Image: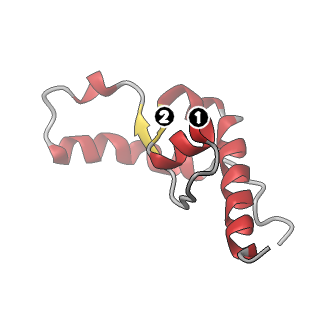
Amino acid sequence: IKRKDLIEKDLILHQILFDLSRDRFFTGNVLFKGGTCLIKSYFGYLRFSEDIDFTWKDQSVFNGMSQKAIRAYLSRFIDKIGEIPLTIGKDL
C-alpha cells in the first residue's frame, strides 16, 4: 500500500459519517452532499475526497432572509452540532 495516510483519512471520514448518522438532531436537520457523498454513495473509489459537505434540510426557512439573518439562525445550532458525540479520536 503506497498511501497509508489516505486509508487512515478515509477510515476517519467513515467513522465521522457513521457517528453523525446516529444522531437524531443531525439526521433530522442536515443533508450530506457534494463529491464525497457521491463517491461514498454511488461511484466507489474513483477518486479520493477528504472533505465532507452538508446542507440544511429545510431550505424554506431561509426564504426572504438576509445572509446575516441566515447566519444568526444557524448559529443557534452550532453548539448543538458540536455536542454530537464522535467516537473518532477516543482511541487515538
Taking the view exactly as shown, the residue that stands out farthest to the right is 91
Residue 32, horizontal then vertical, whole percent: 51, 38
Q: Residue at x 25, y 41 (%)?
A: 70
Residue 11, horizontal then vertical, whole percent: 74, 58
For label 1, the crowd category at 10 Å Cα-Cα, with few meaning under 14, some 14 to 19 and many 20 or more, is: few
Residue 46, horizontal then vertical, whole percent: 58, 52
- Residue 91 vs residue 50: left or right? right
Q: Secondary structure at mark 1?
A: helix
Residue labelled with disc 1: 42
Residue labelled with disc 2: 30
Residues at marks 1 and 2, CA–CA distance in whole angstroms: 19 Å
Seen from the viewer's position, the closer of residues 31 and 85 is 31
Seen from the viewer's position, the closer of residues 75 and 9 is 9
Quadrant where the image shows the C terminus:
bottom right
Q: Quadrant of residue 5?
A: bottom right
Seen from the viewer's position, the closer of residues 53 and 10 is 10
Against 47, is 70 above or below? above
Type of the residue with mark 1: Tyr
Against 82, is 22 above or below? above
Type of the residue with mark 2: Val
Q: Residue at x 57, y 59 (%)?
A: 48
Residue 42, horizontal then vertical, whole percent: 58, 34
Q: Secondary structure at mark 2?
A: strand
Q: Residue at x 54, y 26 (%)?
A: 28
